[in-house]
């Protein structure tokens, strides 16, 4: 059996470990041939495909980024009617020419949607969820999330010393457009006093009151963790908006920090390396069993598979009954 593997969407820690997990299992256990597809789905359109061997996989476990490269190509989004723009047909031609029996797609929500569309054309597809946002529906965790949370938590830890030394309010903005998982997990792990998520409405007056109440308790400093996707006004960035509003509401000196792309780079944590390895291996098992059209998913402590038709177009969001939200509120943390 000949399988192709591609990585699509934003980079994140653990992609290379997943490639390694798929390929080593395919080559060593199942005797399959493996081909790397460069630059995501664009590589299928452009027939940019190369064979992968054991030698190709050396040093991948802890390496950040992706050796295959990535893009945000959306081949099923029509941009014209000319033959040259018929990207789905061009992908199918590449798959036929290369004799690929299955395509493994590693990526986030957009990738899962494209993988589902590709499966609808009759191509054998297996996908693996990849995102630091942890918002892919159907899996408890996606690789990359733990690494991003660890980076954000370390940053919050470091801000505590500045906040206490200068008796300031420190606002840190982490990634998460629609889902606040990084803000929730890093905010709780880093001892945030206020955590703002896109899914939970907030009142700036309540935030100001929470900071003033901390002062009354002898705590003239606060750490505010905000997801980048919280609602703001006048197109302001989340951290800037919240910092300005807090300073206006309380009169306290407030500073903001935007963590940005640092959260997506570098080596994966041990948890993500093992999760990526398990997901890659299970994806290859699904191929061997002929269970195509599925996404690999972590369900509890076990690997499972979810039909791509159920995953595509859905988001996994934080809810107010989440254990961490409930426990945080019990401990006096303000969620807005």
Image: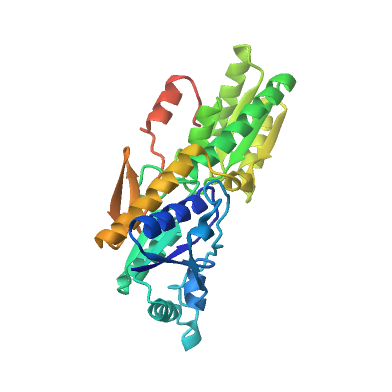
Residue 51 left/right relative to 243: left
For image coordinates 29% across by 57% down, the residue present is 286
Q: Is residue 153 above or below residue 290?
A: above
For image coordinates 33% across by 72% down, the residue present is 123
For image coordinates 48% across by 64% down, the residue present is 52
Q: Quadrant of the N terminus?
A: bottom left
Q: How many marks?
A: 0
Find residue 164 and report its image quarter: top right
How did the renderer colour the structure?
A: rainbow
For image coordinates 63% across by 45% down, the residue present is 262
Residue 293, visible in the rendered structure: yes
Q: Is residue 217 above or below residue 268?
A: above
- Decide which of 219, 13 is in the foreground and name it: 13
- Decide which of 231, 111 is in the foreground and name it: 111
Position in image of residue 236 (x %, y %): 64, 47
Position in image of residue 264 (x %, y %): 58, 48
Residue 206, visible in the rendered structure: no
- Decide which of 107, 277 is in the foreground and name it: 277
Position in image of residue 227 (x %, y %): 55, 41
Position in image of residue 136 (x %, y %): 40, 50
- Decide which of 202, 15 is in the foreground and name it: 15
Going by the picture, which residue comes out furthest to the right? Answer: 166
């Amino acid at each position: 059996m000949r399988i192709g593997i591609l990585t699509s969407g934003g980079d994140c820690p653990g992609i290379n470990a997943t490639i390694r997990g798929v390929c080593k299992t395919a080559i060593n256990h199942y005797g399959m041939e493996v081909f790397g597809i460069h630059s995501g789905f664009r590589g299928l359109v452009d027939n940019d495909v190369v064979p992968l061997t054991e030698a190709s996989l050396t040093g991948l476990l802890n390496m950040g980024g992706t050796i295959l490269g990535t893009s945000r190509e959306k081949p099923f989004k029509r941009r014209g009617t000319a033959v040259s723009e018929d990207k789905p047909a061009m992908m199918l031609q590449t798959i036929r020419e290369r004799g690929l029996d299955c395509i493994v797609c590693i990526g986030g929500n957009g990738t899962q949607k494209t993988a589902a569309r590709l499966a609808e054309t009759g191509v054998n597809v297996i996908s693996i969820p990849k995102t630091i946002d942890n918002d892919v529906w159907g899996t408890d965790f996606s690789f990359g999330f733990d690494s991003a949370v660890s980076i954000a938590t370390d940053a919050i830890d470091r801000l505590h010393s500045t906040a206490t030394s200068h008796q300031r309010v420190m606002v840190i903005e982490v990634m998460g457009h629609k889902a606040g998982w990084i803000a929730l997990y890093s905010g709780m792990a880093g001892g945030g006093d206020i955590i703002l998520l896109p899914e939970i409405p907030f009142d700036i007056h309540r935030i100001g009151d929470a900071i003033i109440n901390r002062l009354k308790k002898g705590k003239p400093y606060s750490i505010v963790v905000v997801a980048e996707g919280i609602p703001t006004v006048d197109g302001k960035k989340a951290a800037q908006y919240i910092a300005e509003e807090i300073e206006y509401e309380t009169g306290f000196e407030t500073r903001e920090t935007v963590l940005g792309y640092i959260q997506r780079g570098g080596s994966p944590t041990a948890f993500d390396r093992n999760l990526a390895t398990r997901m890659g291996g299970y994806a290859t098992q699904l191929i061997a069993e002929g269970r195509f059209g599925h996404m690999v998913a972590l369900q509890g402590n076990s690997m499972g598979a979810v039909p791509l038709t159920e995953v595509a177009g859905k988001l996994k969001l934080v809810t107010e009954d989440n254990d961490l939200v409930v426990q945080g509120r019990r401990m006096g943390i303000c969620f807005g």
